[in-house]
Image: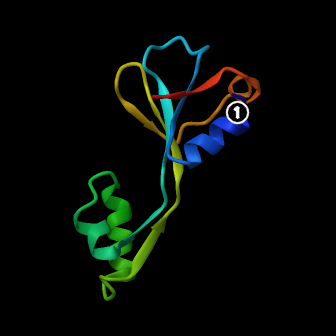
Amino acid sequence: MNFGQAIEAVKNGKLVARQGWNGKGMFIFMRPACELDTETVVNKVQSLPDSFKKWVAGHHGDAPTEKIKFGSYLCMKAADGSVVNGWLASQTDMLSEDWTVVE
């Protein structure tokens, strides 16, 4: 597949990878958009810095059920097993025709 087809597959919930990547077991996926109420953001989400949580509490503290929208983004499962949030394609990735769906 080309990159455009790979992106469409990711948008449809698939895992995709390039055959040309050197690392074993690497693939990308999309973290979908979501909305979280401010109480959840401030008290339960571990992946956000305290500075942002304090900002939310200061600006939305009187509205704990108000929703904050988080946009979708691409992630990569790296060869070492970690997940990289906000993965960006290189020009080589974008121009390659060796994209495949990971089963």
- Whether 41 is drawn above or below 66: the answer is above
- Whether 58 is drawn above or below 43: the answer is below
- Whether 31 is drawn above or below 42: the answer is above
Asked if residue 30 lies left or right of residue 99, the reply is left
Asked if residue 41 lies left or right of residue 68, the reply is left
Q: Count of labels shown?
A: 1
* Residue visible at 43% across and 72% down in the picture: 68
Q: Which residue sits furthest top?
A: 22
**Horizontal and vertical percent position of residue 48:** 35, 55
Q: Quarter of the image for the C terminus: give it.
A: top left
Q: Which residue sits furthest left?
A: 43
**Horizontal and vertical percent position of residue 45:** 28, 59
**Horizontal and vertical percent position of residue 102:** 49, 28
Mark 1 lies on residue: 3
Residue 42 or 6: which is nearer the viewer?
6
* Residue visible at 37% across and 72% down in the picture: 56
Asked if residue 57 lies left or right of residue 92, the reply is left
Q: Quarter of the image for the N terminus: give it.
A: top right
**Mark 1 closeness class: few <14, some 14–19, many ≥20 residues within 10 Å:** many
State which quadrant residue 79 falls in: top left
State which quadrant residue 87 falls in: top right
- Give, as a three-letter code, the residue at label 1: Phe
* Residue visible at 55% across and 48% down in the picture: 12
Could you tell me which secondary element the residue under label 1 belongs to? helix
Residue 81 or 61: which is nearer the viewer?
81
Q: Which residue sits furthest bottom?
A: 62
Residue 84 or 52: which is nearer the viewer?
84
Q: Which residue sits furthest right?
A: 95
**Horizontal and vertical percent position of residue 57:** 32, 75
